[in-house]
Amino acid sequence: MHDVLARPLPPARPRKRAIATAVGFDVVAVVVFATVGRSSHDSSLDVAGVLGTAWPFLVALAVGWLVLRAHKRPFAVWPTGVALWGITWGLGMALRAGTGGGTALPFVLVALGALGVLLVGWRFLASFTSSARSTYPGLSQH
């Protein structure tokens, strides 16, 4: 007789709330990147201006999420975070250049670093805090 309990469980799928949280953190990261960049150049910080700077990177981020199927491991530093960083930066720069946006070398390099810190950084912190909570269960108690 086939024992159902002997079969390994399928890998747990992240809940919709976790996926939405990860998408939200990524979107906020890109908007923060655009806002800080605009403020450092004394540009307008109105919604239209920030979105005008952020849109190529937001589109690239969405493409990255779809291509990578990032919903399967939305909080993973590797490969999700690192690959999203590369796609968001590379495709975002291509979209920006293709639509007449500036791609001066200093901007390209700053964008590479800032998006890396923001898109990979929050995942790194989340993985650390998750590891700390499982290693030291008392940290999650109030």
Image: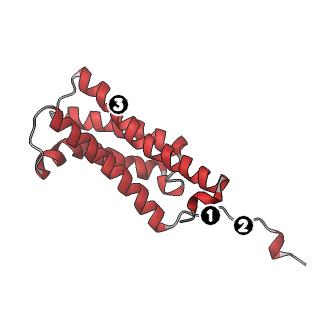
Could you tell me if the residues under marks 1 and 2 are in contact, i.e. CB atoms within 8 Å? yes
Q: Amino acid at mark 3?
A: Leu
Other residues around mark 2 within 10 Å, as few (<14) / some (14–19) / many (≥20):
few
Q: Earlier in the sequence, mark 1 or mark 3?
A: 1
The residue closer to the viewer here, 137 or 131, is 137
Query: Residue shown at 27%/40% (left/top)?
Result: 33
Of the residues shown, which amino acid type is indicated by label 1? Ala
As displayed, is residue 101 above or below residue 56?
above
Q: Is residue 49 left or right of residue 3?
A: left
Q: Amino acid at mark 2?
A: Leu
| Label 3 – label 2 distance at C-alpha | 39 Å
Q: Check residue 12 in the rendering and tell me which mark sits there, or answer none.
A: 1
Kindly identify which numbered label has been placed on residue 112. 3
For marks 1 and 2, give the CA distance: 8 Å
Secondary structure of the residue carrying numbered label 2: loop
Q: Quadrant of residue 11?
A: bottom right
Q: Alpha carbon of mark 1 to alpha carbon of mark 3: how far?
A: 33 Å
**Circles 1 and 3: CB atoms closer than 8 Å:** no
Element under label 1?
loop
Q: The N terminus lies in which quarter of the figure?
A: bottom right
Q: Earlier in the sequence, mark 3 or mark 2?
A: 2
Task: Determine the residue positioned at 45% across, 61% down.
Answer: 19
Q: Nearer the viewer, residue 115 or 65?
A: 115
What residue is pinned by disc 2? Answer: 9
Residue sitting at x 37%, y 50%: 26
* Classed neighbour count for the residue bearing mark 3: other residues with Cα under 10 Å, few (<14), some (14–19), many (≥20): some
Label 3 or label 2, whichever lies nearer to me, is 3
Quarter of the figure with residue 138: bottom right
Query: Are the two marked residues, 3 and 2, in contact with CB atoms closer than 8 angstroms?
Result: no
